[in-house]
Amino acid sequence: MQATTLLPRTGDLFHQGLERQAGAALLRFGAARPRPAGRISWSGRGAAAWLDDARGHVWSVGEPAGAAGLVVRAAHGLPDRVREFTGPRGTDALVGRHLPVTDVVEWVFRWTLAEPPVHRAEERVAELDASHHEELLAFLEEHSPAHSTGPGSSDVSLWVGIRDGEGDGRLVACGALSSLRDSGAPLMASVATDAALRGQGLGAALTSWLTRYAVRRHGFCTLWQLADNTPAERLYTRLGYRNEDPCVAARIVTP
């Protein structure tokens, strides 16, 4: 695999225009502009990558072969700091030729610039505050134990929910507006519905409401979707989320 060059600290991921190409939305929305002080980044062979040092995570976009080369370069150059990566679909297999990888998960990074059509149940969505965190956590642990973001997370700016009945009825759906770590871009997260009430449009109402909220305040909204989640794929497509960025995430096995 061809070696790539570490960009100087004065370099910028956006100078090459890769973020305007299909399949590079993660760079467009996920990497801050201007460059945060001290960000380490790489580019080469139609790909770009940058290090989330706090997590030991390398983010990469572009052609899979080029992206894989950047991940390998990063792991070899910073062996004590690089533990995992996300890249375009196929990056894991190419990295795996040089480094042992595990915990491979396929995702789609989706985004929209437009407000969705109004869902009839959006009027039931209500904002929640810190006093509801214990209730939210119990709900998520029961109905979405693999949720990505929990109550109290510093990345979350808003929690919303739908209740059964009026007033302080039982929580039957919830969701959050979080943010991407580097750029602070709005990221929908931890949308969950009571398992006994799925298929009734509660998740669609929450998703529509949160999307509208983000678009009105930020001009866009992003989310991560598991690649094999067909119901979510249909919903997000119906709400106008683009589907151009199939990704894969994996962990690098360290000795």
Image: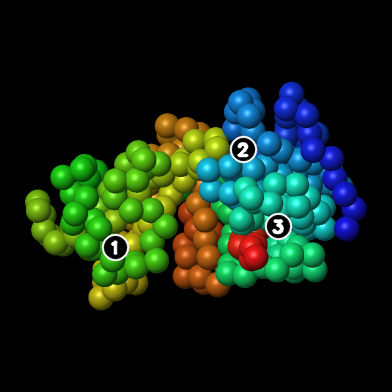
Please report contact status of discs 3 and 2: CB closer than 8 Å, yes or no: no
Element type where label 1 sits in the image:
helix
The picture places residue 167, in percent across and down from the top left corner, at 9, 51
Q: CA distance from mark 3 to mark 1?
A: 30 Å
Quadrant assignment for the N terminus: bottom right
Q: Which residue is mark 2?
A: 31
Q: Which residue is mark 1?
A: 140
Q: Which residue is mark 3?
A: 88
* Residue 130 versus residue 230 in the image, above or below: above
Q: Neighbour class for label 1 at 10 Å: few (<14), some, many (≥20)?
A: many
Q: Neighbour class for label 3 at 10 Å: few (<14), some, many (≥20)?
A: many
The picture places residue 217, in percent across and down from the top left corner, at 42, 32
Residue at x-position 76% and y-position 40%: 42
Q: Is residue 242 left or right of residue 216?
A: right
Q: Quadrant of residue 9?
A: top right
Q: Is residue 161 left or right of residue 156?
A: left
Whichever of labels 3 and 2 marks the residue nearer the N terminus, that label is 2
Residue at x-position 70% and y-position 47%: 78
Element type where label 3 sits in the image:
strand
- Outermost residue toward the front in this view: 255
On the question of residue 60 being in view, the answer is no
Please report contact status of discs 2 and 1: CB closer than 8 Å, yes or no: no
Quadrant assignment for the C terminus: bottom right
Q: CA distance from mark 2 to mark 1?
A: 29 Å
Element type where label 2 sits in the image:
loop
Residue type at mark 3: give it: Pro
